[in-house]
Structure formats: structure tokens, C-alpha cells
Amino acid sequence: MSVELTYVIWSAFLGLIYLGVQAMLFRLDFGFRYANTQRDIDPPPPNKWNKRGQRALANFLETYGVFLALALATELSGRSDNLTVWGAHIWFWARVAFLPAYFIDINQLRSSIWTLSLIGLLLMFIGVAF
């Protein structure tokens, strides 16, 4: 299995971690009783941690489709090279670091990690497209 496909598998697990963190924070904020309902009534505004969990998951999902498309295009085209491999490494590990960084209040840390993950996607794109 290629490095890129290996990261596709592990990124699915990472996505489950993001989802689990978001779901746990939602339940801690609104309670298990409300979380297990149809949610026909509007809850009060979410607390800071719940909002961060929601935004972190949304941010992961925004780049996840691009990563999947690039990884699969790399595999199907047989164009895996150092750029695509490094890009997959960088994207994945930046996304691992991004989740805790979203909850740590260090100025510019989260944005820097996000930029690093974007660089990983750009490397993959260049590797597979050119």
C-alpha cells in the first residue's frame, strides 16, 4: 500500500477522533439528555469549548475532501513521488497537531499549523498535477 493510501486510512481514524472530541464537548455542554433528543428546541448558546470543538471539526472537514481527492488521484495515476509523500506526511501530522492547538490559547499557533497543512496539500497537488 502506498504512503498516500496509508494516510487515507489513518486520516479516517483521525476524523473519528475529531468527531469524538466534538461530540464529547457537545454532551458536556448541553448534557446527555438533550444530546439524545431530536433537538426540536434550540439549546442555549454553546460554551467556548463546545464552539472550539465544532470549529475544529468543521475545519478538518474543509480540507479532508481535498486531501482525499489528491491522495486518490496520486494512487490512481501512479504519480506518487517525494512531493506527494511529503505532502501527505505534512498534511496528516499538521492535522494531528491542529486539534489540540485549537484548544490552546497560544497566539498564531493554530493558524500556523493550518498553514502547514495547506502547504502539505499544495505539495501533493504539485506532485500529482505536474
Image (cartoon, grey):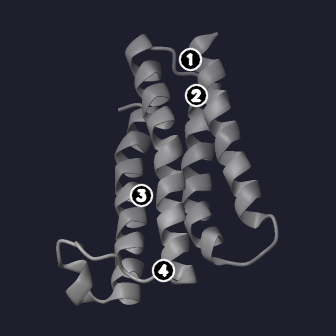
* Distance Cα–Cα, label 3 vs label 4: 27 Å
Dot 1 crowding, Cα within 10 Å, few <14, some 14–19, many 20+:
many
Numbered disc 3: secondary structure: helix
Please name which of the two marks, 2 or 3, marks the residue nearer to the observer: 3
**Along the polypeptide, which appears first: circle 4 or circle 1?**
4
Q: Amino acid at mark 4?
A: Pro
Name the amino acid, label 2: Thr
Residue count near mark 2 (Cα–Cα under 10 Å), binned few <14, some 14–19, many ≥20: many
> Which residue is disc 4 drawn over?
45
Hey, what amino acid is under mark 1?
Val
Decide: few, some or many residues near mark 3? Use Cα within 10 Å; few <14, some 14-19, many ≥20.
some
Please report whichever mark, 2 or 1, sits nearer to the chain's N-terminal start.
Answer: 2
Marks 2 and 3, how far apart at CA: 19 Å
Q: Earlier in the sequence, mark 2 or mark 3?
A: 3
Residue hosting label 1: 128
Q: Nearer the viewer, mark 4 or mark 2?
A: 4
Residue drawn 53% across the image and 63% down it: 55
Q: 128 or 59, which lies in front? A: 59
